[in-house]
Image (spheres, rainbow, N blue to C red):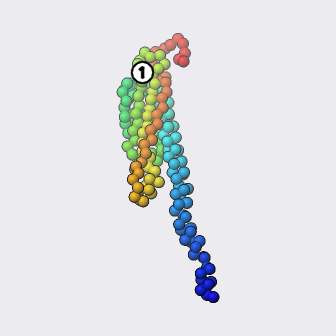
């Protein structure tokens, strides 16, 4: 009778099932969160680039050395006020060699065509990639996030009789 009760006792079965299912459940819950953080980081990077372009569009500094005609690539914290402002707005999850390029396009006499362009590049480390590497799979260490913004340069030293279109 005791042998029959021991065979019918299934109390340990639940513990084994939970032990087998828990890692899969954690991965299934973490993957959307990890990609959500990556998208949020990319969104904050876009906002930083947009703010840098906005600051550059009204900055007299951009009309001189830092961003005229050539691309100036710098890393944080930088000496240029535009780069410093972008660095202050970048998310902390963005790592690796951060690159901020500022550029003023167009020629001095171009009617309303001079643009300030700010491009931000950095690396994002997916935590999921680190877990997959533990299993032995070959995956990249990180992914590159690049965002750019362009705005019309407002301090053009030319006055026009009609509005820019």
For residue 20, side relative to residue 5 (left or right): left
Q: Residue at x 44, y 16 (%)?
A: 110
Along the line of sight, the residue nearer the viewer: 58 or 25:
25
For residue 86, side relative to residue 9 (left or right): left
> Residue 20: horizontal and vertical position, in percent?
53, 66
Residue with the most extreme top position: 161
Q: Residue at x 49, y 42 (%)?
A: 42
Along the line of sight, the residue nearer the viewer: 100 or 27:
27
> Residue 59: horizontal and vertical position, in percent?
45, 27
Q: Quadrant of the C terminus?
A: top right
Q: Is residue 52 visible?
A: no
**Number of callouts in the render?**
1
> Residue 60: horizontal and vertical position, in percent?
44, 25
SS class, disc 1: loop
Residue with the most extreme bottom position: 1
> Residue 14: horizontal and vertical position, in percent?
59, 71
Q: Quadrant of the N terminus?
A: bottom right
Please rate how many residues cluster around mark 1, counting C-alpha atoms within 10 Å: few if below 14, some from 14 to 19, many from 20: some
Q: Is residue 24 visible?
A: yes
Along the line of sight, the residue nearer the viewer: 1 or 20:
1
Vertical arrangement, residue 158 with respect to residue 146, above or below? above
Q: Residue at x 41, y 51 (%)?
A: 139
Q: Residue at x 51, y 51 (%)?
A: 34
Vertical arrangement, residue 14 with respect to residue 67, above or below? below
- The residue that mark 1 highlights is 106
């Amino acid at each position: 009778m005791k042998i029959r009760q021991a065979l019918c006792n299934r109390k340990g079965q639940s513990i084994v099932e939970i032990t087998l299912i828990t890692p899969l459940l954690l991965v299934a819950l973490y993957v959307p969160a990890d990609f959500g953080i990556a998208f949020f980081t990319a969104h904050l990077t876009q906002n930083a680039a947009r703010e840098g372009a906005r600051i550059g569009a009204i900055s007299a500094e951009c009309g001189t050395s830092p961003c005229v005609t050539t691309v100036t690539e710098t890393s944080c914290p930088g000496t240029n006020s535009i780069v410093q402002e972008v660095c202050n707005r970048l998310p902390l999850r963005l790592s690796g060699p951060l690159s901020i390029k500022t550029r003023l396009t167009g020629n001095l006499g171009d009617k309303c065509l001079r643009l300030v362009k700010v491009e931000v590049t950095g690396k994002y480390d997916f935590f999921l990639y680190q877990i997959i590497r533990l299993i032995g799979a070959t995956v990249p260490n990180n992914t590159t996030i690049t965002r750019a913004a362009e705005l019309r340069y407002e301090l053009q030293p030319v006055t026009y009789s009609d509005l820019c279109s």
